């Protein structure tokens, strides 16, 4: 197992506020796990009892809707933490976390993390800021769902995937979501998403390469997303 104090990933999360001694303590109690693509890290309603630090890979956070379909709420990448809100609220997980690609994660028990809250004010503040950021993102998403058209939401999501996760050497989006997953992110039926992608392709905003997507005209997509 790698040592937390030597892990560059911690610099991108709330853990950056911990001292060397605190990081060494975490190293002694954490467990490292390999999560295969499609596997579940934790399920909605599960008692997580700790946090997961994402060392590598990407996962999706989903919420089961009343009609039985999963709605993608957020994508989580390297350097982020999972389970912070459940740990603070002392409630079961409100979302499910599922790997979109092979992942490396470290699990840190809840009792170890909570022990730092009384002793390290900066760490506590970082965790609170992270949770507030999640709430802000949820607010923005709710407004977009209510006020933007499906076409605008699709354009916005494609721009987000490009700017957040980048592209492969062939210029295709690095994060390749299925049509079902893309439809889930923008809150529409899969058929509508497929039809809109075809329209974007005809407008030469994107290029469809099998199941992969290339953004051909990023400025126009950004304008459409507004």
Image: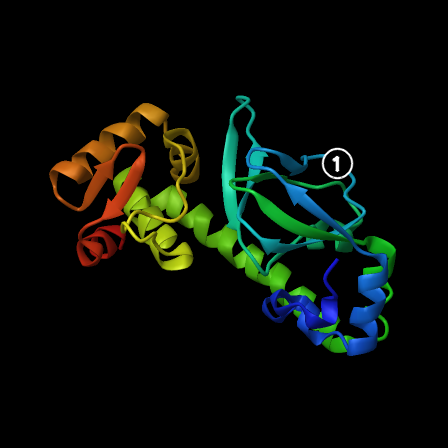
Which residue is at the front of the view, 18 or 118? 18
Quarter of the image that includes the N terminus: bottom right
Residue 10 image-quadrant placement:
bottom right
Q: How many marks?
A: 1
Give the farthest residue toward the front: 1
Which residue is at the front of the view, 54 or 83? 54
Q: Position of residue 208 (x, y in %)?
A: 23, 37
- Residue 223 appears in the figure: yes
| In the image: residue 129, left or right of residue 164 | right
Q: Position of residue 23 (x, y in %)?
A: 78, 70
| In the image: residue 101, left or right of residue 212 | right
User: Measuring 51% from the left and 25% from the top, which residue is drawn there?
Assistant: 69
| In the image: residue 116, left or right of residue 94 | right
User: Measuring 37% from the left and 53% from the top, which residue is drawn there?
Assistant: 160
Residue 134 image-quadrant placement:
bottom right
Answer above or below: position of 63 versus 2.
above
Q: Position of residue 64 (x, y in %)?
A: 58, 30
Q: Label 1, on which residue?
A: 46
Q: Position of residue 178 (x, y in %)?
A: 40, 33
């Amino acid at each position: 197992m790698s040592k937390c104090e030597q892990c560059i990933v911690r610099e991108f999360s709330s853990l950056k506020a911990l001292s060397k001694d605190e990081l060494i303590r975490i190293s002694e109690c954490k467990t490292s796990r390999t999560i295969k693509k499609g596997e579940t890290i934790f399920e909605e309603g599960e008692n997580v009892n700790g946090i997961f630090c994402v060392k590598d890979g990407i996962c999706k956070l989903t919420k089961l809707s009343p009609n039985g379909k999963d709605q993608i709420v957020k994508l989580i990448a390297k350097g982020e933490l999972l389970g912070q809100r459940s740990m603070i609220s002392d409630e079961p997980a409100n979302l499910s976390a599922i790997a979109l690609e092979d992942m490396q994660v470290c699990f840190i028990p809840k009792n170890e993390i909570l022990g730092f809250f009384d002793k390290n004010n900066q760490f506590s503040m970082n965790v609170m800021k992270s949770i507030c950021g999640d709430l802000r993102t949820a607010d923005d998403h709710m407004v977009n769902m209510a006020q933007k058209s499906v076409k605008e939401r699709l354009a916005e999501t494609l721009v987000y995937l490009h700017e957040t996760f980048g592209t492969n050497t062939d210029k295709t989006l690095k994060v390749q979501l299925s049509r079902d997953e893309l439809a889930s992110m923008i809150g529409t039926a899969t058929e509508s998403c497929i039809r809109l992608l075809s329209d974007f392709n005809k407008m030469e905003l994107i290029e469809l390469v099998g199941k992969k997507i290339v953004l051909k005209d990023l400025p126009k997509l950004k304008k459409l997303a507004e």
